Structure formats: structure tokens, C-alpha cells
Amino acid sequence: MRLDMLKTEPEAYQAVFALEKYLSKSRLSSTHKELIKVRASQINGCAYCINMHTRDARKAGETEQRLYLLSAWRETDLFTPEERALLALTEEVTLIGQHVSDATYQQAAALFDEHYLAQAIMAIATINVWNRIAIATQKPLD
């Protein structure tokens, strides 16, 4: 059994949770937030977060079909242009070693104002922090 971050370092855990609190008050739609969380978690292979956020997405009205096809979103017409831009951005920010291309950034910037885009980037960064904590500590499924 690995450490429980909340019990071991509650101040650090609460600092990350403060980002979630900020995001809950952001203009990001619940659909956009959950798509970002699920897609980043899929890329990172975070079972805990995939389990949590697919459940949350369904509660928020997301369809099973879209969740099943999320990892192959480019091959479907199930996602709006805005969702496609956010998914592309999510993938590139999550796989940051390859950098965020100008084309991906400009596509998102053309669809969203600066504040929405900044909030999306914060949402992507935040789920990546949670993924890394859950994976490193082997957080068990709820």
C-alpha cells in the first residue's frame, strides 16, 4: 500500500483542490470539463480518474457512445468543433514533451475568448496533476 496524499500532505492536497474550486466557478461548461478530465486521464492511464470522471460525465448528461469513442474522437462526427479543439489541446498539453502546436492553439483561440481558453488550459493542467498523484500513489478505485 502506498501513501495517502491527503493524510500525508494535506496542505499540498488542499492546494491542488483549490484549483478544482477555482475551476468549479469558471465559465467552462460541465461537458467541456468532463471531456478534458476523461481524455487526459485516458492518455495518462489513470484508472482512478477515468472511473471517477466517466461517472461524473454520465451524471452531467454525457452519452455512453461519446464516452466509448472519446479515445478515437478524430474518427467520429460526434464532437462539436469546440469540443474537438479542446480535445486536441488536451492531448497536446498532456503530452507536453511534444509541445502545443501553433495550429492547435490557434484553432482553440479562434473558438474561445482568452478567459475561456485560459480556464481550459488550467483544467487540463489540473487533471494532469491529479492523474500523477493518483498513479504515483496507486489510489484505489472508489
Image: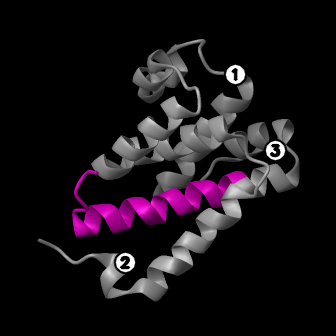
Do tag 2 and tag 3 residues touch (Cβ < 8 Å)?
A: no
Using the image as rendered, state which of residue 69 and residue 21 is in the foreground: 21
Q: Amino acid at mark 2?
A: Leu
Q: Amino acid at mark 1?
A: Thr
Q: CA distance from mark 3 to mark 1?
A: 15 Å
The residue sitting at the right extreme is 113
Q: Residue at x 43, y 37 (%)?
A: 55
Residue position marked by numbered label 2 in the rendering: 6
Query: What is the number of the mark on residue 109?
Result: 3
Q: What's drawn in magenta, residue-wise?
A: 120-142
For label 2, count other residues whose C-alpha is less than 10 Å away and answer few (under 14), some (14-19) or many (20+).
few
For label 3, count other residues whose C-alpha is less than 10 Å away and answer few (under 14), some (14-19) or many (20+).
some
Using the image as rendered, state which of residue 126 and residue 106 is in the foreground: 126
Lower sequence index among marks 2 and 3: 2
Q: Is residue 31 magenta?
A: no
- Residue 21 place in picture, x, y as percent: 64, 65
Q: Residue at x 33, y 77 (%)?
A: 5
Residue position marked by numbered label 1 in the rendering: 80
Q: CA distance from mark 1 to mark 2?
A: 37 Å
The quarter of the rendered structure image containing the N terminus is bottom left
Q: Main secondary structure of the magenta part?
A: helix
Q: Is residue 121 magenta?
A: yes
Q: Is residue 15 left or right of residue 46?
A: right
